[in-house]
Amino acid sequence: MASLFSATKEGIDVPIPLKIPRVGRDQPVESLIGFETEPTILRSLKSPYVPKYLDSGNMATRPYIATERVEGRPLEDCIKEGKVFSIDEVVRIGADLTQAVQSLRSQDAIHLDIKPENILIDEKEKLTLIDFGLSHHARYPDLLAEEMRKGIGSAPCISSEQVARIRSNSRSDIFSIGVIMYELLTGELPFGNPQSMSGLRRRMWAEPFPLRAIRREIPRWLQEAVLRCLEPRAADRYQSAARLRQVLRNPEGVTLTERADRVEPPSFWENL
């Protein structure tokens, strides 16, 4: 959606990331709408999990967004390098993600594009969420919705309600956390990387392959937690990031259901 530059400014002794939108006939309108949305949301957020907003330019004359520089590398890089994450590492990352999402929710914001590329982790394992172009804020106009643009996010990670173009449900971010934890634990995506709307709609009814069928040492409580995050109906997931964090920090209190014992994929008839 944009090009990134390293800029300097008198009085600031560290490089400043400068984000400038790509424009042209081949660029989707959603990119420009998202670029207009992002500074409005960043300006309103105060969180240790979000880059600090510094400045932005007029969309019509000199569009840019300047933020503080955040150390770290995308979680996606670790995945592409073939890193095998321990169960403890995945639980820690999941718990940190829930805390980041809860900090947004407490400020009436929903990220709606949580994916490994948008998660930076530094050497001290501190986590930062970036790229708020598709985000929703309860106190500001939702330009993507008003323009009837889809702007639904990254195909592997978006929730079933996002597929249905519902952008105001905070439990969408919980679904995305479930996708990320599933991938870190198994090396697979629960619903693949669909390139069509029919492929995206599959998550509105399908059950993902059980994690313990891929990696037997995953504890039953963790499979229960991840699969509950991936429920098609938002009402069947954890109802807040705070509750999911409590589960990840205190697994002995997890109530196990049939989700915890799944070791076989659903049959054709069950899917039907």
Image (cartoon, rainbow, N blue to C red):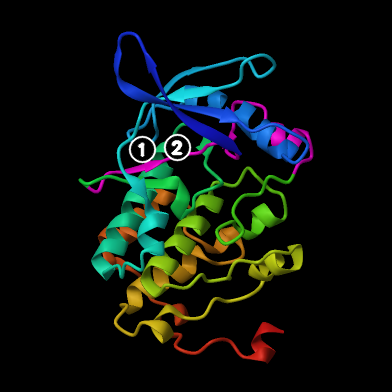
Q: Earlier in the sequence, mark 2 or mark 1?
A: 1
Residue 216 in view, yes or no: yes
Q: Are marks 2 and 1 in contact (CB under 8 Å)?
A: yes
Query: Residue 14 location in percent, x, y?
Result: 29, 22
**Residue sitting nearer the eye, 111 or 5:** 5
What segment carries the magenta color? Answer: 125-149
Q: Nearer the viewer, mark 2 or mark 1?
A: 1
Task: Return the residue at label 2.
Answer: 104
Residue 146 included in the magenta stretch of the image:
yes
Residue drawn 44% across and 54% down? 116
**What's the amino acid at mark 1?**
Tyr
Q: Quadrant of residue 202?
A: bottom right
Q: Main secondary structure of the magenta part?
A: loop
- Residue furthest top as drawn: 10
Is 95 on the left or on the right of 149, as rendered? left
Answer above or below: position of 103 versus 253.
above
| Relative vertical location of residue 257 with respect to residue 263 in this rendering, above or below | above
For mark 1, does the 10 Å Cα neighbourhood hold few (<14), some (14 to 19), or many (20 or more) residues?
many
Q: Is residue 218 above or below residue 97?
A: below
Query: Which quadrant is home to the N terminus?
Result: top right
User: In the picture, residue 211 is in which quadrant?
Assistant: bottom left
Residue drawn 39% across and 63% down?
Answer: 79
Please give the residue where the numbered disc 1 appears in the rendered image: 49
Q: Position of residue 184 (x, y in %)?
A: 38, 66
Q: Mark 2 belongs to which amino acid?
A: Leu
Local packing at callout 2 (Cα closer than 10 Å; few below 14, some 14-19, many 20+) is many
